[in-house]
Image (tube, grey):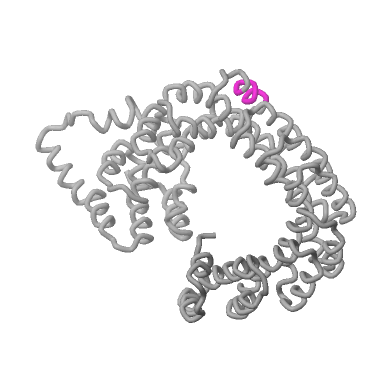
Amino acid sequence: MGPSLSFRTWLLAAAAIGAPALFLLWTPRADTPELQAGSAPQRAAAPDSRPPAAAREADDDRSAGPDAELSQVLSEPDPGRRLQNFFRIFAPVVSSDPASALRRLRGVPAGPERTQGAFLLVQQLGIADPEGALAVAQEFSDPGDGGQLLRVLFSRWAQQDPTAALTRWETLPAGPARAAALRALVESWSRRDPPAALAWARGREPGADRAAALEACLRELAARDPATAIAEAATLPAGHAQERVLQQAFAHLVRRQPDEAARLLPALPPGDAQTLIVSDVARALAERDLPAALAWSNGLTIDFTRWLALGSVLAVWAQRDPAAAARHVLELPPGPTLDYIAGQFVIHLAARPAEAIAWAESLTPSARDAAFVTLASAWAQSSPAEAVAWARGLPAEPTRTNALAAAHAVWRALDPAAARQWLEDAGLPPATRSRILAPR
């Protein structure tokens, strides 16, 4: 049975955009004949009931058909052409005879063709033959791909019948693929029926499955109602799952209601989540109201969080009025806050090194030294030889070697040969050379 007109039209369109995207575009046709009995693997292994002569004749025809073409295609040295031609031959077989496609796929060596062929086959079997689709997904899953085949399959099933999808999910063995399938299932279910998915996730026994299901629900909720997702994230155990939910929810909230995001942020427990989010909140506030953003940043009680927020506000300010922002830094009281901010803010002045140096000279000694090290690194991005020469001329240690190491590290990344030659010719003491070359 050849491909229908609509399938040929799809194949030509897919070929036009490139083979790697084919499996994303392919959805089985509604009029594709359903499998009659048993799963795809079972049918592929069924004994041949044809008379021997007829079987040999059919096998001879087959050897001159898709099997031979596949063998020829898989010998193509160009990866893009190989994958594109593989789909040209394999996709019609998947559409017309999934059992034959499975048999052929088992003979394809590991690689992009085998992976994407498995995607096509799983998509084709997903509704007509769930057991066969699940068997194929498990057979061709790669331990290093994060359970992608199972994610596609369970996401699709959850759109159709979440209860049946859950029943099939329960049969999966423990491991990363099972967790990936659960996330895909619950995310898809949450788009269809958020209360039901969330209630099921909450009802699970404490453990990895409950945490994964709640994360999937809340990540979906974050796009629709970020403030509620932030509140619900408190029910997750502290860890990476909670951090991912909070980051996504705050990202949505910052775009819509930065004032609400600023109000909620201090309520988060100290940790990586708060640290990662604070810069985005401060930047969004500063875009709207600089004085209010400064006041909010200064009111944060955790030192490093406050420094990150203030640095983000000053970055926005420096884009509008760098001189005013630079004066504000000079007016900060001496101490750790000034040292950190000076070391960050000098980046905004580095395009004019002479002015940046003069500004840094007006700081307290510790803040000046922090600024000099950062300036050496930033200056080296455009003029590494000049930055290294300036750093070498600084009068005091350890600032001189620290600045020299920062500038030379950038030079090594930009032009390794020139940086190495400079170091060979510089005549530096061995201890200084070692510090310059130490991993940063």
Instruction: Please tell me whether residue 193 is drawn above or below residue 431 in the rendered image.
Output: above
Instruction: Please tell me whether residue 42 is drawn above or below residue 317 in the rendered image.
Output: above
Q: Is residue 57 left or right of residue 155?
A: left
Q: Position of residue 138 (x, y in %)?
A: 37, 33
Q: Position of residue 8 (x, y in %)?
A: 41, 52
Residue at horizontal 64 percent and vertical 68 percent from the top: 397
Q: Main secondary structure of the magenta part?
A: helix
Name which quarter of the figure residue 191 lies in: top right
Single out the residue that lies furthest toward the right: 291
Residue at horizontal 71 percent and vertical 65 percent from the top: 369
Assign the C terminus to one quadrant of the image: bottom right
Q: Position of residue 243 (x, y in %)?
A: 64, 38
Residue stretch rendered in magenta on the structure: 195-201
Front residue of 66 and 406 = 406
As for residue 312 lying within the magenta part, the answer is no
Q: Is residue 63 left or right of residue 329?
A: left
Residue at horizontal 51 percent and vertical 34 percent from the top: 156
Name which quarter of the figure residue 129 lies in: top left
Assign the N terminus to one quadrant of the image: top left
Name which quarter of the figure residue 362 lies in: bottom right
As for residue 200 lying within the magenta part, the answer is yes
Instruction: Please tell me whether residue 360 is drawn above or below residue 120 in the rendered image.
Output: below
Q: Position of residue 405 (x, y in %)?
A: 57, 68
